[in-house]
Amino acid sequence: MASRIVPVGGTIGIMGGGQLGRMMALAGRAMGLNAIVWDPQPIGPAHEVAGDAITAGFESEDALLRFSEGIDAATYEFENVTYETTARLARIKPVFPPPDLLYVSQNRLREKDRARQFGLATTTYRAVPSAQEARQVAADLGFPGILKTVSGGYDGKGQIAVNTMEEAGMGFQALHGSEPLIYEKKVAFIQEMSVVVARDQNGRIAIFPASENHHDQGILDWTVVPARVPDPIQQLALHQAAAMARGLGLVGVMALEFFVTAEGELLFNEMAPRPHNSGHWTIEGAWPSQFSQHMRAVAGWPVASPRLFGPCVMLNLLGDLFLEGLDKLTRVLEWPGVQLHWYGKTAMRKGRKVGHVTVLADSVTKAIQRARDVKVALGGAWHDGA
Ligand code: AMP
């Protein structure tokens, strides 16, 4: 296998052509790393900034060989990349995070099982193999609950709320394809929180401060840092993120999502072995950014202890706001401390992430207030709830 240290001027292969790949490629470029994108689609956010692109499905043998020839190391920007492809690629070129992490994260049961092995508390859950058992599992674990597909779900997709045994049976029929399902007891959380942790090839760990996350209809709406969560709970989350990173052999960046209950319990929900939407604030709000950390680790370079510059809010921009055009977009730049990120997506669709805004301010309250102003100026509604 080639050297695991990529020289400045080397090339990182990115599997997936979305906004995370774009921001990885941008961060890499700043440090002298080129990017080649491999994606089934011929155009996408990452293609605009990558030096080259391969358009093919992830099962293509020919594409795998061409991709591997042009790169020094590879990474992936989403979890729908075929695990087998990353494992085969890893025999030719270094792939980070190691494909094992992709394997774990592609399945909700696996990731919760692993989290428990490392001492993290999780929601109560159980596998649901049939409609009959869906009723039984729901009755055993209790209501309300949520049925989820074990893989492929994102932004709240592939999930159904369950309040009765009948709904459990119906939910199973509605969701069940070739996929097994998982039933989770619904958590009455008071806050959602995530932690982005980076680990380099020498095992050095660098953790960003925890992010407090607010969702709307299953999609991350906004994130604020520092999180308004009691410090001991934040410290526990950081400690657990480090334990997972070490235990799973992470190289690169990984995000862990947690629920915080009124009783002060911290419950692991899910993980992603890549930069995360709830870490986008690090581009302006910290040094280095999560993308920079990721590229450093993938290239075999050291990760750095992050510095937080001050309170900030990341506000997601969905296509819903721009169905009639982009004219109002530049309005947001009139406020101080506001930075726009636009992903260059061609179609504005409801529920589709098309950009985000970072707001830097002197206090959390002011950052939230300004983010609210931005959202309203763009014609959106502000949601305060968790
Ligand atoms: P997930 O895809 O698991 O991250 O779920 C998306 C969102 O649905 C989460 O961020 C929560 O807001 C909500 N959710 C998921 N699982 C649960 C649960 N067990 N209890 C309460 N809310 C949940």
Image (cartoon, rainbow, N blue to C red):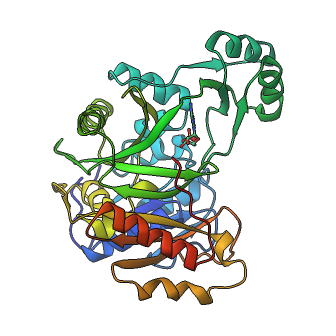
Position of residue 231 measured from the top left corner of the image (x, y, whole percent): 24, 39
Q: Is residue 29 above or below residue 162?
A: below
Report the residue at 80% width, 19% height from top: 131
Report the residue at 84% width, 27% height from top: 170
Q: Is residue 56 left or right of residue 114?
A: right
Q: Is residue 333 visible?
A: yes
Query: Would you identify the image quadrant in which residue 283 lies?
Result: bottom left
Position of residue 193 measured from the top left corner of the image (x, y, whole percent): 40, 43
Report the residue at 30% width, 36% height from top: 237
Query: Would you identify the image quadrant in which residue 24 lies?
Result: bottom left
Q: Who is closer to the viewer here, 45 or 145? A: 145
Q: Is residue 307 left or right of residue 155?
A: left
Q: Is residue 105 above or below residue 130?
A: below
Q: Is residue 214 left or right of residue 352?
A: left
Q: How many marks?
A: 0
Q: Who is closer to the viewer here, 115 or 216? A: 216
Query: Would you identify the image quadrant in which residue 107 lies?
Result: top right
Report the residue at 51% width, 87% height from top: 331
Q: Is residue 45 above or below residue 288?
A: below
Position of residue 45 measured from the top left corner of the image (x, y, whole percent): 53, 72
Query: Which image quarter has ligand 1?
Result: top right
Q: Is residue 55 above or below residue 334?
A: above
Q: Is residue 272 visible?
A: no
Position of residue 76 measured from the top left corner of the image (x, y, whole percent): 45, 54
